[in-house]
Amino acid sequence: MASNTSRNSKQRNGVQQGRKKKHKVNQLKPGTSGHTLTVKVVDRYSVLSFIRPGRIAECLVGDETASIIFTARNDQVDLMKPGTPFDQKTVPTGTTVNLRNTKINMFHGFMRLAVNKFGRIEVVTEPADITVKEDNNLSLVEYEPVYL
């Protein structure tokens, strides 16, 4: 049987290559990585770090499905701006960002989202119309490790 040599270069073994699929916040699970998300920054607060030099801030980010705490480090802190609490139409505003190549870190049994060393944070120039679902905060769910 003849082999198919005219296969599209962007398709390999029936799987489309290229841009990664965008995930929603409610799809995040402990121990996973490689996520691409579009989220809105709801809140940001600084965390004092006595162990290492540098700036660390924890930001509550989310989309229409859920929210999670994102750990921003050094230059990332300046990109994660929550904006003003309310504008003239009393609609919450904040910076919309694309988070590429993120991972889930566990901090005392709770999930935290972070960008790994090959990841990127991109501020969206035209903010998306995202109403963040703050009542489904994935960082409030405690996970216990199971040792086998």
Image (cartoon, rainbow, N blue to C red):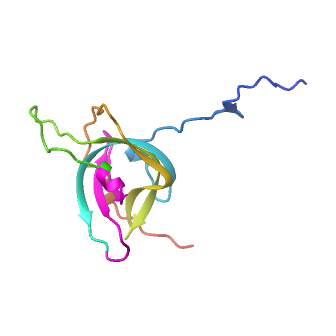
Horizontally, residue 14 falls left or right of residue 127, namely: right
Residue 146 placed where, x, y %?
50, 70
Residue 91 placed where, x, y %?
15, 36
Which region of the structure is painted magenta? Answer: 50-78
Q: Could you say which quadrant of the image residue 63 lies in?
A: top left
Q: Residue at x 62, y 35 (%)?
A: 17
Furthest residue to the bottom? Answer: 51
Quick one: quadrant of the C terminus?
bottom right
Horizontally, residue 31 falls left or right of residue 72, namely: right
Q: Residue at x 30, y 32 (%)?
A: 128
Vertical relation: 18 (above or below) 82: above
Q: Residue at x 32, y 64 (%)?
A: 55
Does the magenta-highlighted stretch encompass residue 57? Answer: yes
Q: How many marks?
A: 0
Residue 41 placed where, x, y %?
27, 46
Does the magenta-highlighted stretch encompass residue 121? Answer: no
Q: Residue at x 17, y 40 (%)?
A: 92
Furthest residue to the right? Answer: 1
